[in-house]
């Protein structure tokens, strides 16, 4: 299968590109390297020493004989090149990771809010418009987020996979209607994924594009079997207050002797998935597309749920690190339950990596190994959801 | 009250600006004159001889002594100027008409789809971001569309004003939830208004912006008491296949002896409002804003509903014009019922102009008076919703 991976240089995109190449697909990475540019802007770097995309691809070819193409292209700004690429390459499928993906970054300031909306919405719409303009039947797999649903909205019912059947009162009695789960985004970043959902629903209906939207939980872990083949293929590991995801941050903090930074009470329950399962889920989604004319297919791409404080306590017990409760910069409930339907991927053969199995490996092979690369002034989250909200000073000296 | 009218040179924006100025508000029009530029692109012109914005404002001042300011600014492209404008002008309220508003134009080609999404979503988000950045408590009144709801979704229940209470099944029995009415947009244009709704919900919640969204029906009529004061203040009248609204198109067609062009069976039921009521509704919305922290307030800005074929038959009876059934370029149900809640504006004192009262005046004072300005090659709708759909050739010679 010929697959374009949009955002294929990023944290999820790079291991996905290697996995798809490894199992025999013809992969082209399309990326404007914006995530690396944001590292420059934030004056921080991946904890792991990631190599330039050209070197990554060369090493992959040397080790496996497999070819990955790379096109440096801005999805939001270079529509004409995108359309031409589709017409020339005639891909069977597009995997779309090419969006700004950090909630804290999206709330940082006016510029980052505007960039997140403009980049993500224009990019997603350009991809849809280019598929229509190409006249080709290209399946689209898009990375969504569990954050489109909000937390605690459904009472004791599990969060469904995308759609909800509700009863609507009418003068003739209740009628049943299937609706897209109501949008409850918690940041400008999450908001853009709820906008994407409406774009997808329209283009699936009007233009019969085959679309799969993957509502992913928080990714943890760094390496997949392919990225671990050679240090020059290593995946990125973000530990800073904007891009670092909670579990990876805790592991790095433990490795350098920094307190584990819990926002608020830590009573927030979140959904998790290992990066190894992310890449398998993308494969499964590509192999099981919806039919033309179907509404977008939605999978919940999560494997387990935990309270943040429980994760901190778990890592504290393993490593002896202290836990620090900091002001929460987000506007969110202090505590929530989370019950997520995730039957589809399990039914299609996903065999998840459990937190209880992968944590020690991650701590040893990544966080401890590269701990000297950490800049302790970048650990505390500085973005706040509304002007005047409190953050914490640095907890250790730089 | 100091009010910025974004899109204040357009079909709804101009009469609203005059009305608000007339009742004593301090009005500044912000417009990039894009609607006039699209006239150039489509090689068509308003049936009525509209004057340049500078002349319009000068004449208004001569006749009434009232001052309207004008700022030529692109909301989507000139964020920094917009933010500076808010900080300098410190408006109490913003009325936002500044979006591409024609469904057929939004489906015309890839460029117009992309323009509609980029312009409308970026523009709306820039306005929200600028209000937040200004730190001012500026109320926002936005022109939405009845098209966000779709048609026939609610069974025998009337379409509510924005929000719907549904029952969600859970293991503990049904729970009630109030949701934004599910989005069912029928074109890329309507899609952008459903995206706007999600932007508004987020910014009302996170930043406590006071927002009113007006889901307007199809506007008919041309003049208000203010625009009728002098021919140099006349409002625009669109009759072409992209921007002309159905009733105005029928009136103009009747005036020049062209068949009344009905798409499909004409069994589509649509909601209507006279332009005189639009401007009154904006005034009422400005005078009744939500409180800080409230969810966006939604009004259905419609006064009556009719089937398209019945309107054609009514005008045919008045004028002797033939009715022509043409292929429908839209993807929509051939026929639908439409039952709309519109209690709020009536409760707040709106006294609607009925179709039965205003039609003859409109036919005489506008369509017949300016019929020699019509270009008959622009009457047939050429945009189609999906490649390969049929349109009609011109019905009369140019």
Image: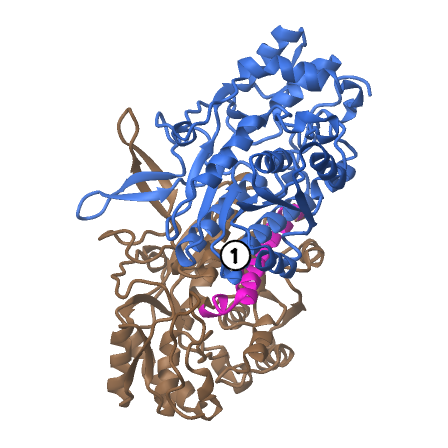
Chain colours: A brown, B blue
Q: Work out whether A116 lies above or below B341.
A: below
Residue toward you, A107 or A148: A107
Q: Residue furthest front?
A: B65
Q: Which residues are magenta?
A: A104-133
Mark 1, residues whose alpha carbon is within 10 Å: few (<14), some, or many (≥20)?
many
Residue at 69% x, 59% y: name it: A78
Q: Is residue B286 left or right of residue A40?
A: left
Residue toward you, B290 or B193: B290
Question: Magenta-highlighted stretch: main secondary structure?
Answer: helix
Q: Is residue B349 magenta?
A: no
Q: Work out whether A247 lies above or below A98.
A: below
Q: Is residue B221 left or right of residue B369?
A: left
Percent of width and height locating residue B361: 63, 15
Question: Of helix, strand and loop, which one carries label 1?
Answer: helix
Residue at 37% x, 68% y: name it: A273
Q: Which residue is mark 1?
A: B131
Percent of width and height locating residue B278: 54, 31
Percent of width and height locating residue B54: 75, 41
Residue B258 visible from this viewpoint: no
Q: Is residue A374 left or right of residue A206?
A: left
Residue A357 visible from this viewpoint: yes
Q: Is residue A127 magenta?
A: yes
């Amino acid at each position: 299968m010929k697959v374009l991976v949009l955002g294929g240089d990023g944290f999820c995109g790079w291991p996905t590109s290697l996995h798809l190449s490894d199992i025999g697909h013809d992969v082209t990475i399309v990326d404007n390297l914006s995530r690396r540019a944001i590292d420059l802007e934030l004056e921080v770097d991946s904890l792991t020493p990631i190599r330039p995309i050209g070197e990554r691809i060369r090493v992959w070819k040397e080790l496996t004989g497999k070819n990955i193409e790379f096109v440096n292209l801005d999805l939001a700004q270079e529509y004409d090149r995108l359309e031409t690429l589709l017409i020339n390459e005639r891909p069977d499928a597009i995997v779309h990771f090419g969006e700004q993906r950090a909630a804290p970054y999206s709330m940082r300031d006016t510029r980052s809010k505007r960039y997140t909306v403009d980049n993500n919405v224009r990019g997603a719409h350009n991809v849809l418009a280019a598929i229509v303009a190409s006249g080709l039947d290209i399946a689209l797999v898009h990375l969504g987020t569990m954050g489109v649903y909000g937390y605690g909205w459904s009472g004791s019912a599990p969060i469904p996979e995308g759609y909800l059947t509700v009863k609507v009162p009418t003068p003739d009695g209740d009628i049943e209607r299937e609706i897209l789960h109501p949008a409850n985004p918690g940041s400008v970043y999450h908001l853009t994924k709820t906008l994407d959902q409406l774009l997808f629903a329209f283009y699936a209906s009007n233009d019969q594009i085959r679309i799969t939207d993957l509502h992913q939980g928080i990714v943890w872990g760094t390496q997949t079997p392919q990225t671990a083949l050679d240090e020059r293929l290593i995946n990125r590991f973000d530990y800073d207050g904007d891009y670092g995801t909670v579990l990876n941050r805790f592991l790095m903090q433990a490795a350098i002797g920094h307190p584990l930074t819990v926002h608020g009470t830590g009573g927030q329950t979140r959904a998790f998935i290992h990066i190894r399962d992310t890449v398998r889920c993308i494969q499964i989604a590509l192999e099981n597309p919806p039919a033309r004319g179907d509404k977008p297919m939605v999978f919940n791409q999560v494997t387990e749920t935990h309270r943040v404080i429980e994760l901190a306590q778990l890592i504290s017990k393993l490593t002896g690190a202290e836990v620090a409760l900091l002001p929460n910069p987000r506007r969110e409930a202090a505590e929530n339950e989370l019950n997520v339907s995730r039957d589809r991927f399990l039914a299609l053969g996903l065999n998840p990596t459990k937190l209880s199995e992968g944590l020690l490996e991650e701590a040893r092979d990544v966080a401890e190994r590269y701990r000297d690369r950490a800049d302790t002034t970048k650990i505390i989250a500085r973005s706040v959801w509304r002007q005047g909200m409190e953050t914490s000073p640095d907890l250790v000296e730089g």
